[in-house]
Image (cartoon, rainbow, N blue to C red):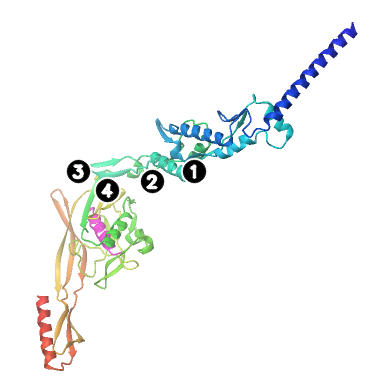
């Protein structure tokens, strides 16, 4: 009995061995025949695309055509809150290394390792999937990221106080802003290239610098003053705008002292100021920061109308055109300053606007602090005639004279503020201002006349000059 079982097992083993041998022989014959092929072996795919038995060129064309078809309507989707933003893969700069994928597909069964090559060739039913290297061209990806950045970006809005056309006071609420987390978005795009899932955009929150709490106790406009600078040169207009910004949004607490020069800092090209006309010793010259005195003067008048305490103020050497004489406030770095103190019980808030035509300062505060209606006026105290100065020159003949500068009068003014409360009215002196006269300068000739011809020419010259001056 045992011998019969043993013989049966031996028979089965022989049959199994014969089957294995036949299978191996068949596979070997298959291997020998197929391995001679110059095409890609069976069972090789790139993604879902079968490249079996194709030549390199045929595989390249098939892959390229399929990818081209895929890209026609292929978009990557991004979710921003409840809004979907779609960007075509082509716009993202999609590219795929098809040539390398084809080479890898062709190399299956051609590694040089006989055993591995044998297995790969004789098992065409077993899929060998080649990974296609995909990516995005850097410049196109960066443009798409810039597009998303622009879509996401929302600047935070500072709280502010304004007056309506009807002069009603209003507080504008602050709002948070947002901006795209660019690095995270870039990584998400690169990792999503083959999955093509919807990408929730990661945004960061940006907070306003000024919130409603800043205006606690502020509920009214106390004063407003405007000057015109529409005829100024471009450099002067730029300086006015820059200078005004230093005070826009400035909060001054009760008893706090403010220095104009200390707030503006160094007036230099490196800080953005440009060359424009400035008064130097009473003469107009080109200098950095021309126009800054219009800022200090406009602010000064707004402060006066709010009945705030002025600690330091200086007039210009000579009168200026954009305010009444006696109401200007000159500033010179390290020499002349405008200083004031918030002598009111509540904080104040300054706003400035320079639109290229008008410069306006507004002072906001608590309506309870606006006790008086303030009016500023000036009185002429005296007029000083200019001196006449003669300058000798060889450019003119003897006994010839020319007016080089017609000069200007000097003035003394007193400035007052009138405080009105109902029927009550009081007047306070603010300051004295003295504006230097400008000398009249006459050029006197020293050149000798050599001939009658020169005398005639000289007379003609004088005649022509008189005509021009008239």
Which disc number belongs to residue 49?
none
Secondary structure of residue under mark 2:
loop
Secondary structure of residue under mark 4:
strand
Query: Is 38 in the magenta?
Result: no
Could you tell me which residue is drawn at 64 percent across and 36 percent down? 107
Cα distance between the residues tagged 1 and 2: 38 Å
Earlier in the chain: of badge 1 and badge 2, it is 1
Cα distance between the residues tagged 1 and 3: 53 Å
Give the residue number, with chain letter if any, for mark 4: 364
Give how far across and how far down residue 274 sits, in percent. 32, 63
Q: Is residue 312 visible?
A: no
Dominant secondary structure of the residues highlighted in magenta in the image: helix
Give how far across and how far down residue 93 sits, in percent. 47, 41
The part of the image, by quadrant, that contains residue 168 is top left
Give how far across and how far down residue 321 sits, in percent. 18, 64
What's drawn in magenta, residue-wise?
289-307
Which of 400/215 is in front?
400
Callout 3–callout 2 Cβ contact below 8 Å: no
Which disc number belongs to residue 165?
3
Cα distance between the residues tagged 4 and 1: 54 Å
Query: Is 293 in the magenta?
Result: yes
- Residue furthest top as drawn: 1
Earlier in the chain: of badge 1 and badge 3, it is 1
Check the picture and name the quadrant holding the C terminus: bottom left
In this picture, residue 187 sits left or right of residue 368: right
Give the residue number, with chain letter if any, for mark 1: 137
Which of 88/45 is in front?
45
Observer-side mark, 4 or 3, equals 3
Earlier in the chain: of badge 3 and badge 2, it is 3
């Amino acid at each position: 009995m045992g011998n019969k079982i043993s013989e049966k097992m031996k028979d089965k083993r022989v049959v199994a061995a014969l089957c294995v041998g036949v299978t191996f022989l068949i596979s070997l014959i298959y291997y020998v025949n197929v391995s001679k092929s110059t095409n890609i072996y069976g069972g090789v795919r790139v993604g879902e695309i079968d490249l079996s038995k194709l030549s390199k060129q045929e595989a390249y064309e098939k892959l390229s055509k399929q990818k081209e078809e895929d890209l026609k309507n292929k978009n990557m989707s991004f979710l921003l809150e409840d809004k979907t933003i779609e960007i075509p893969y082509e716009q993202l700069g999609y590219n795929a290394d098809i040539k390398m994928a084809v080479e890898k597909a062709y190399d299956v069964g051609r590694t040089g390792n006989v055993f591995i090559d044998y297995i790969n060739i004789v098992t065409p039913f077993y899929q060998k999937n080649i990974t296609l290297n995909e990516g995005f061209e850097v410049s196109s990806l960066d443009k798409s990221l810039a597009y998303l950045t622009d879509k996401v970006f929302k600047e935070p809005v500072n709280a502010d106080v304004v007056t309506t056309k009807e002069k009603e006071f209003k507080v504008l609420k602050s709002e948070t802003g947002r901006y795209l987390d660019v690095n995270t978005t870039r990584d998400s795009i690169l990792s999503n290239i083959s999955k093509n899932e919807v990408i929730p955009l990661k945004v960061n929150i940006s907070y306003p610098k000024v919130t409603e709490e800043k205006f606690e106790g502020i509920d009214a406009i106390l004063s407003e003053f405007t000057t015109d600078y529409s005829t100024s040169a471009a450099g002067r207009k730029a300086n006015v705008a820059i200078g005004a910004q230093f005070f826009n949004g400035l909060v001054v607490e009760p008893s706090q002292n403010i220095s104009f020069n200390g707030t503006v800092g160094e007036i230099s090209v490196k800080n953005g100021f440009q060359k424009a006309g400035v008064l130097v010793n009473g003469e107009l010259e080109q200098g950095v920061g021309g126009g800054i005195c219009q800022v200090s003067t406009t602010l000064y008048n707004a402060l006066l109308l709010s009945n705030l305490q002025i600690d330091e103020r200086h007039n210009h050497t000579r009168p200026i055109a954009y305010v009444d004489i006696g109401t200007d406030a000159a500033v010179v770095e390290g020499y002349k300053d405008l200083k004031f103190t918030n002598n009111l019980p509540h904080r104040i808030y300054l706003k400035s606007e320079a639109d290229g035509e008008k410069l306006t300062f507004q002072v906001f505060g608590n309506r309870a602090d606006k006790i008086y209606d303030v009016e500023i006026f000036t009185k002429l105290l005296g007029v000083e005639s200019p001196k006449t100065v003669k300058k000798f020159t060889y450019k003119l003949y003897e006994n010839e004279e020319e007016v080089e500068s017609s000069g200007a009068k000097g003035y003394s003014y007193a400035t007052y503020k009138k405080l009105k409360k109902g029927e009550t009215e009081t007047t306070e002196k603010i300051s004295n201002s003295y504006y230097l006269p400008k000398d009249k300068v006459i050029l006197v000739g020293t050149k000798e006349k050599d001939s009658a011809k020169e005398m005639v020419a000289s007379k003609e010259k004088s005649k022509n000059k008189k005509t021009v001056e008239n």
